[in-house]
């Protein structure tokens, strides 16, 4: 069974790739350079894809800086130590997962893939609306109503195995599958030499996840 894997190079996407491989999928990875300030994650995506011997790894350039309006794609400071603040944070990238899933859908149709896997998580996350089950269900309807593969075969099916897990649960699952999390990158605002800042939402959630899982955090932080 063929699967397209949205692979960012982060902790979650590495975990779903390991899960897909463990379930015997023929994996076609898609990574997207979207003008994010933490583009260093592409090096991590390449490491993870190589480690799991994916069938192919497509890297797409799509510069969302043309829109801006996010701390990840515009000249806006990344918030620090604010992970539990209410509301949708400024690190939300407008329609990012809608855009990413549309690209993954085109890739999946072209490869006649049965599934699209992505590592969104609606428990330990920053409040992004496009990481929720309701969004995934809505996009599944887009597939069924607006594509040849959806109309003829009812596929590809969206697979989001982490959506209801805590970050600690995700890490435990990955460790059980032998995921080397030192290959991954999560920080939104890394230092020029690639060290994680330790204080953005993504770093805080990652650190908290390793602590709660009782697993040593392999991340190199610039600040502790």
Image: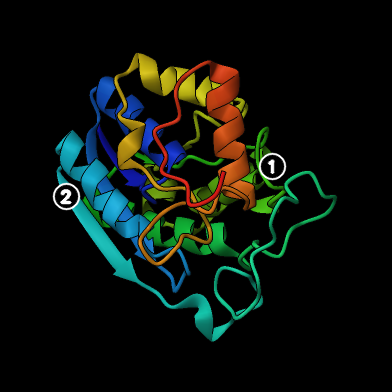
Compared across the picture, whether 99 is left or right of 69 comes to left
Q: Badge 1 is on which residue?
A: 134
Of the two numbered discs 2 and 1 in the rendering, the one whose residue sits closer to the viewer: 2
Picture quadrant where residue 4 is located: top left
Q: What is the x, y in percent for residue 89?
A: 73, 59
Which of the two labelled residues, at mark 2 and mark 1, occupies the earlier sequence position? 2
Q: What is the x, y in percent for residue 108?
A: 32, 51
Q: How is the image coloured?
A: rainbow
- What is the spatial separation of the Cα atoms under label 2 and label 1, in whole angstroms? 30 Å
Q: Residue at x 72, y 50 (%)?
A: 81
Q: Residue at x 36, y 48 (%)?
A: 9
In this view of the protein, can residue 88 be seen by the observer?
yes
Compared across the picture, whether 11 is left or right of 162 comes to left
Badge 2 element:
strand
- Residue most extreme to the right: 86
Q: Residue at x 66, y 77 (%)?
A: 69
Q: What is the x, y in percent for residue 54?
A: 18, 41
Classify the position of the C terminus by image quarter. Answer: top right
Q: Residue at x 62, y 53 (%)?
A: 200
Q: Badge 2 is on which residue?
A: 56
Q: What is the x, y in percent for residue 114?
A: 32, 38
Of the numbered discs in the image, which one, if any, rests on residue 207?
Answer: none
In this view of the protein, can residue 136 be seen by the observer?
no
Q: Nearer the viewer, residue 66 or 207?
A: 207
- Above-or-below relation of 184 to 82: above
- Above-or-below relation of 90 to 127: below
Q: Mark 2 near mark 1, Cβ–Cβ under 8 Å?
A: no
Classify the position of the N terminus by image quarter. Answer: top left
Picture quadrant where residue 2 is located: top left
């Amino acid at each position: 069974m063929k699967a397209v894997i949205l692979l960012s190079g982060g902790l979650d996407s590495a975990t779903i790739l390991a899960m897909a491989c463990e379930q015997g999928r023929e994996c076609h990875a898609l990574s997207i350079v979207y003008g994010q300030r933490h583009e260093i994650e592409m090096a991590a995506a390449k490491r993870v894809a190589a480690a799991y011997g994916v069938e192919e790894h497509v890297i797409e350039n799509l510069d969302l800086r043309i829109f801006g309006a996010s701390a990840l794609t515009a000249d806006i400071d990344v918030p620090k130590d604010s992970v539990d603040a209410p509301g949708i944070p400024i690190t939300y990238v407008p329609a990012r997962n809608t855009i990413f899933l549309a690209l993954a859908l085109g890739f999946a149709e072209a490869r006649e893939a049965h599934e699209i896997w992505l590592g969104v998580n609606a428990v330990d996350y920053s409040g992004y609306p496009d990481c929720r089950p309701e969004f995934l269900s809505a996009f599944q309807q887009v597939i069924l109503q607006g594509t040849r593969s959806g109309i003829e075969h009812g596929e590809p099916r969206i697979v989001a195995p982490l959506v209801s897990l805590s970050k600690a649960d995700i890490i435990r699952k990955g460790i059980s599958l032998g995921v080397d999390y030192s290959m991954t990158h999560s920080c939104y605002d890394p230092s020029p030499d690639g060290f994680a800042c330790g204080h953005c939402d993504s770093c805080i959630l990652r650190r908290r996840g390793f602590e709660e899982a009782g697993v040593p955090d392999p991340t190199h932080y610039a600040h502790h």
